[in-house]
């Protein structure tokens, strides 16, 4: 029976190809916009590391002066990053399971191949714990150990892309690479790694960027005098020299720690407060104690990682889909009621109301699904365009869940558009229309 | 087969009430060929629609093949209609965008028959009306008489116990009308109960029994002294059938 209703529905769609095409396009556009903006929203708003995001904390220390504020929107908030002095101070703690300060830099790489020209590479300066803390996947080798941090050993980790570029994807562990004026030996090569969003550094609207291509022990910030590529906020005066910058009250370093339970967390919070008290004695930290440990998802919310545009566009797209569907109600109602005499005949020949309803709803759902497929195709094209124009690699792509969402949206759109017309046509009194024609 | 008792049908519009049928009682035995005559607006189509479960009534009772149809759900009613009744309309009422085969297929599909059985039934019915060669034609590619023959084939393909025909020859010339009449008579002779509305006394005469409707009432034409309604007693009918 269902197959017969399907056949009738298909017939009806085929018999009016232009109208059907328009209906499919309408739903398709709505679904395309909705899935594309849903994908963008989902990538910004998702949990990048779901199984441990409640155990990873962003560290905020309030070293700010009394006479100004680090955050014009929230006077009470501590600065969003920490100073070099404080980083060195709190890295002394042995309470966290893992801990790493980090900062983005942009040094020059000098490949050894004769045909390879020097280039600048986005590089993350971090501690050994970065890799186990964020569960970074390795293809070859591994990260460095804490001793390498202490001794400032010249080691680096490359991401898959950089390794492809420099070594054709071969296992480069043990080989060396010249960065600025030093030779570094490669200890690990990553598998492709793409936290969505890039939670560990969201500054400068950068949450959708790829992770850096090179990872280097933090100690080389000082040794290579590498400039911070991200934001820096300062108060007070200091000399132009790099050494003076490092001693200044400039906040420019992100600090993450892994704390596995409440006790550990309280202990570490206590440690931070004790550190601040001690600094007060040295004449720093003039404000009341205000040191914070912020879990990943709260941090992403604080940082407003989801741009208002993404929310707005998502809302507009969904509304657009609703408007499309609601408009289709009228069109489908007209189409169906024009067929009332024929439905009268079918009823006389034994079709139940339910069967008429099913046939017509099926027709709407078929249009919806065709629209959905068209929409998903369009959506892939749109996201491809976004990727290219924002240089985001393959970040904005439909995954299984988004394809599922697209299909569900198109079914819902089909139902919204179709239920009322299908109900109306199944209620027509057969006797009324049999006299006509 | 059909037992109507005191059936009343009132059409209500905003300002007027039309008593289309006023307490009509009627009994038709299985295998009968009954014609229904009466002036325009006398309620013939209404009677046929109620008999065919296409319309509801306001008062009275209706037993179809011994089954009380009041209180049946739409689903049960549709099933009963599909299994027992074939319709032939004055305006043919073929579905315009599907071909002859698919038109005859419609009631068989709703009956849920397998493809092979449907094909056989359709070919047999088309053979009976002599249109086997037009099986792939669209209704618009057939003459009026041919369309009505397809409609006859559609009505009888499922082998219903009852065929209801509302002015089946009303849109046809007299030669075509005769052809359709011959077909209907043949079907009746094969055992199908036939109720036919017509304006043509000559055609009506070919039925075993003639009913006359006036203002929603059955009248007995033999009592020409007035429009005295005749309540056909069940006993009388069964006596007549013997
Ligand atoms: N849907 C309706 N709404 C209101 N009144 C109706 C409706 N259908 C029929 N009627 C009225 O009921 C009465 C009987 O109508 P019916 O169609 O049964 O007549 P008929 O005998 O078939 O006439 P004809 O020979 O012209 O086909 C008429 O007075 C008609 O106006
Ligand atoms: Mg009529």
Image (spheres, coloured by chain):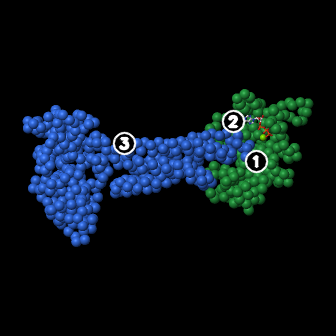
Chain A: give its colour: blue
Q: CA distance from mark 2 to mark 3?
A: 59 Å
**Both marks 1 and 2 on one chain:** yes
Residue A370 visible in the displayed image? yes
Q: Chain of mark 1?
A: B
Lateral position of residue B84 relative to residue A238, left or right: right
Instruction: Give the residue number, with chain letter if any, for mark 1.
Output: B91
Q: Is residue A214 above or below residue A35?
A: below
Q: Tell me which residue sits at (87%, 44%) in the image.
A: B201
Q: Please tell me whether mark 2 sits on a helix, a strand or a loop.
A: loop
Q: Quadrant of the C terminus of chain B?
A: top right
Q: Tell me which residue sits at (63%, 49%) in the image.
A: B110
Instruction: Give the residue number, with chain letter if any, for mark 3.
Output: A308
Which chain identifier belongs to the green chain? B
Q: Please tell me whether mark 1 sits on a helix, a strand or a loop.
A: loop
x and y percentages locating residue A196 in the rendered image: 31, 50
Q: Farthest left residue?
A: A281
Q: CA distance from mark 1 to mark 2?
A: 22 Å
x and y percentages locating residue B157 in the rendered image: 71, 53
Nearest the eye: A205 or A270: A205
Q: Quadrant of the N terminus of chain B?
A: top right
Instruction: Give the residue number, with chain letter if any, for mark 2.
Output: B56
Labels 1, 3: front one: 3
Mark 2 or mark 1, which is nearer the start of the sequence? Answer: 2
**Both marks 2 and 3 on one chain:** no
């Amino acid at each position: 029976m269902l197959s017969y209703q399907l056949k009738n529905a298909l017939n009806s769609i085929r018999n009016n190809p232009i109208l059907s095409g328009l209906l499919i396009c309408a739903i398709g556009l709505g679904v395309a916009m909705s899935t594309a903006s849903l994908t963008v929203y989902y990538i910004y708003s998702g949990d990048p590391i779901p199984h441990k995001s409640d155990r990873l904390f962003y560290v905020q220390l309030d070293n700010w002066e009394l006479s100004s504020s680090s955050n014009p929107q929230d006077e009470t908030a501590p600065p969003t990053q920490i100073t070099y002095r404080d980083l060195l101070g709190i890295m002394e703690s042995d309470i966290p399971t893992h801990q790493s300060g980090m900062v983005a830099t942009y040094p020059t790489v000098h490949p050894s191949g004769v045909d390879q020209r020097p280039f600048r590479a986005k590089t993350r300066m971090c501690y050994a714990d970065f890799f186990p803390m964020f569960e970074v996947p390795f293809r070859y080798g591994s990260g460095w150990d804490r001793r390498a941090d202490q001794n400032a050993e010249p080691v680096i980790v490359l991401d898959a892309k950089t390794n492809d570029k420099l070594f054709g994807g071969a296992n480069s562990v043990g080989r060396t690479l010249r960065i600025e004026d030093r030779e570094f030996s490669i200890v690990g090569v990553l598998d492709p790694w793409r936290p969505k969003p890039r939670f560990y550094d969201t500054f400068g609207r950068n949450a959708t960027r790829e992770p850096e291509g090179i990872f280097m022990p933090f100690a080389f910030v000082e040794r290579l005098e590498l400039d911070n590529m991200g934001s820096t906020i300062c108060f007070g005066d200091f000399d132009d020299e790099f050494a003076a910058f490092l001693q200044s009250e400039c906040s420019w370093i992100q600090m993450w720690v892994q704390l596995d339970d409440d006790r550990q967390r309280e202990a570490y919070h206590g440690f931070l407060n004790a550190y601040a008290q001690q600094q007060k004695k040295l004449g720093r930290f003039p404000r009341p104690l205000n040191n914070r440990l912020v879990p990943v998802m709260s941090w992403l919310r604080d940082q407003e990682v989801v741009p208002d545009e993404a929310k707005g566009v998502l809302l507009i797209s969904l509304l657009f889909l609703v408007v499309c569907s609601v408009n289709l109600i009228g069109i489908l109602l007209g189409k169906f009621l024009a067929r009332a005499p024929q439905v009268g005949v079918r009823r006389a020949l034994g079709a139940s109301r339910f069967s008429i309803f099913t046939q017509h709803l099926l027709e709407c759902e078929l249009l919806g699904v065709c629209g959905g497929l068209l929409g998903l195709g369009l959506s892939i094209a749109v996201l491809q365009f976004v990727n290219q124009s924002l240089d985001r690699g393959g970040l904005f792509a439909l995954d299984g869940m988004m394809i599922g969402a697209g299909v569900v949206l198109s079914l819902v759109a089909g139902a919204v558009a179709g239920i009322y017309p299908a109900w109306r046509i199944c209620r027509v009194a057969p006797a009324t229309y049999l006299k006509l024609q | 087969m059909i037992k109507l008792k005191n059936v009343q049908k009132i059409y209500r519009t905003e300002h007027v009430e039309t008593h289309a049928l006023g307490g009509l009682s009627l009994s038709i035995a299985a295998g009968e060929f009954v014609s229904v005559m009466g002036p325009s607006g006398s309620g013939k189509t209404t009677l046929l629609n109620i008999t065919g479960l296409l319309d509801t009534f306001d008062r009275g009772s209706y037993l179809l093949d011994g089954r009380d149809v009041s209180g049946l759900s739409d689903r049960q009613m549709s099933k009963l209609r599909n299994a027992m009744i074939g319709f032939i309309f004055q305006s043919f009422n073929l579905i315009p965008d599907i071909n002859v085969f698919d038109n005859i297929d419609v009631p068989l599909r709703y009956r849920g028959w397998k493809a092979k059985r449907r094909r056989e039934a359709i070919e047999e019915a088309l053979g009976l009306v002599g249109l086997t060669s037009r099986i792939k034609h669209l209704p618009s590619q057939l003459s009026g008489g041919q369309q009505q023959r397809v409609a006859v084939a559609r009505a009888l393909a499922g082998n219903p116990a009852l065929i209801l025909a509302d002015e089946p020859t009303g849109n046809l010339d007299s030669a075509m009308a005769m052809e359709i009449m011959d077909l209907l008579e043949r079907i009746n002779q094969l055992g199908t109960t036939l109720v036919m509305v017509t304006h043509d006394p000559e055609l009506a005469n070919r039925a075993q029994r003639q009913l006359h409707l006036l203002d929603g009432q059955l009248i007995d034409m033999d009592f020409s002294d007035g429009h005295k309604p005749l309540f056909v007693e069940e006993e009388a009918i069964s006596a007549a059938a013997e």
